[in-house]
Image (spheres, rainbow, N blue to C red):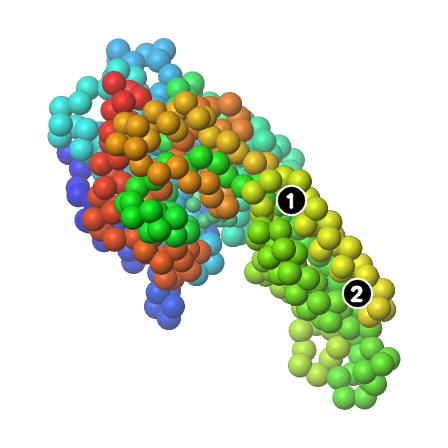
């Protein structure tokens, strides 16, 4: 039998936590994320669940019996990596709740008719190698091994080297880690306030907005901050700054989202006009046409401003995630089974979206977040709502594997 939700949560709490901000730094294949991973293996073993790994850094814990042979599994779970200075819940809540749901079902004497598997996906946030859902993309073939091999972290390190340094034996590409999957259900903390507004502890996802990551390289002329007349400058910082404002305006106009959350400046000195600014744009919208039109408009405004600043700008699409409409039959079945909980669309990306795109019937459960704040140390969910989430996940797994 396993340990309770609160004890699991308490064990994970110190791993990768910053003493200054209280936020989490669990970047893939670094020490803190590996500790979380070791915790996962320990929890699986404690419950007698057989652990498996693939060469992409993904892992699974199996609840299965001889009579399940040949039957497609019901998969649950989430990820243990975090954004830089992230919250405690984004990812781990889905893994802890999965173990909690297995415990509940066993306590109730439930006997599954097919395997139930708890998954942990690698580099869901893309916080180290830039590509979100890297583990699930590789596993399903949506990212090729060659594409993954070319990715570098901020120190210029390659994915394969990072994996090897963490003691893994990488073998990138499609994997059969889960065998055939009848359904995947990912439980996740909500990253907005829909459930607060609807006064509901738990909801079901209807869709994920299409989204993308775009790199904008602004180049100009490095020069002296004191002696270069303002009219003589070719300052890429100005072009970047105006582009950030334009992105904000375009997103507001389109009821979409646009964020520059990462910027690099060269040479990054106080007393020099920069030679280069690189900004990463994260853009999302409810519809693909809206997203494409918004990114086009931002690019045009950046070009236009570069013309006036005497600078240059190049926009590169780093990754795109198409719209996901979760299996409506599965979503309604789960929502009904849970007594008519709300259905909500989200602007956040998830491994569930990647599995859904690969043809697996997929659903998500959301647990209420009182402030809606996420990707921040302030991310939160109340214990009572987390336990309601475990209950909802257990009911869903019982329905799908009963
Ligand atoms: C993942 O959390 C994302 O939506 O960026
Ligand atoms: Mn997540
Ligand atoms: Mn996230």
Q: Can residue 139 be seen in this view?
A: no
Depth check: 160 or 263 in front? Answer: 263
- Residue 57, percent from left and from top: 46, 38
Depth check: 84 or 93 in front? Answer: 93
- Residue 217, percent from left and from top: 73, 59
What count of labels does the image hold? 2
Image quarter hosting the N terminus: top left
**Residue position marked by numbered label 2 in the rendering:** 305
At 25% from the left and 24% from the top, the residue drawn is: 398
**Dot 2 crowding, Cα within 10 Å, few <14, some 14–19, many 20+:** many
Determine the residue located farthest toward the bottom in the rendered image. Answer: 226
Mark nearest the camera among 2 and 1 is 1
At 29% from the left and 48% from the top, the residue drawn is: 199
Q: Which mark is residue 108?
A: none
At 22% from the left and 51% from the top, the residue drawn is: 383
Q: Is residue 357 above or below residue 159?
A: above
| C-alpha distance separating marks 2 and 1 | 23 Å
Q: Is residue 175 above or below residue 206?
A: above
Dot 1: element: helix
Image quarter hosting the C terminus: top left
Q: Is residue 286 visible?
A: yes
**Residue position marked by numbered label 1 in the rendering:** 290
């Amino acid at each position: 039998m396993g340990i309770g939700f609160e004890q699991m949560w308490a064990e994970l709490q110190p791993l990768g936590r910053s003493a200054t901000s209280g936020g989490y730094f669990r970047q893939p294949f670094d020490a803190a994320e590996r500790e979380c991973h070791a915790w996962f293996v320990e929890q699986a073993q404690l419950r007698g669940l057989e652990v498996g790994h693939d060469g992409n850094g993904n892992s699974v814990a199996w609840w299965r019996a001889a009579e399940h042979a040949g039957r497609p599994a019901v998969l649950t779970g989430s990820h243990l990596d975090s954004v830089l200075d992230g919250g405690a819940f984004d990812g781990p809540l889905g893994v802890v709740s999965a173990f909690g749901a297995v415990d509940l079902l066993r306590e109730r004497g439930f006997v599954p008719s097919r395997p139930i598997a708890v998954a942990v996906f690698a580099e869901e946030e893309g916080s180290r190698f830039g590509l979100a859902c890297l583990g699930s993309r590789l596993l399903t073939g949506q990212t090729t091994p060659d594409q993954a091999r070319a990715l570098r972290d901020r120190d210029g390190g390659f994915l394969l080297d990072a994996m090897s340094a963490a003691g893994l034996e990488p073998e990138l590409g499609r994997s059969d880690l889960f065998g055939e999957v009848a359904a995947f259900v990912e439980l996740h903390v909500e990253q907005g306030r829909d459930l607060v507004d609807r006064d509901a502890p738990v909801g079901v996802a209807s869709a994920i907005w299409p989204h993308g990551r775009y790199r904008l390289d602004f180049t100009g002329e490095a020069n002296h901050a004191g002696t270069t007349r303002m009219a003589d400058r070719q300052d890429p910082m100005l072009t970047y700054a105006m582009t950030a404002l334009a992105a904000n305006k375009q997103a507001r106009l389109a009821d979409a989202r646009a964020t520059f959350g990462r910027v690099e400046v060269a040479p990054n000195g106080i007393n020099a006009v920069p030679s280069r600014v690189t900004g990463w744009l994260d853009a999302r919208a409810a519809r693909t046409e809206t997203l494409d039109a918004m990114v086009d408009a931002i690019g045009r405004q950046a070009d236009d401003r570069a013309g006036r600043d005497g600078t240059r700008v190049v926009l590169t699409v780093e990754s795109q995630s198409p719209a996901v409409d979760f299996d409506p039959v599965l979503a309604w079945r789960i929502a009904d089974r849970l007594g008519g909980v709300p259905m909500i669309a989200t602007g956040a990306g998830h491994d569930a979206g990647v599995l859904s795109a690969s043809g697996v019937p997929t659903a998500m459960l959301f647990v209420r977040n009182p402030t809606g704040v996420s990707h921040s140390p302030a991310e939160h969910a109340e214990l009572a709502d987390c336990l309601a989430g475990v209950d909802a996940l257990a009911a869903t797994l019982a329905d799908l594997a009963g």
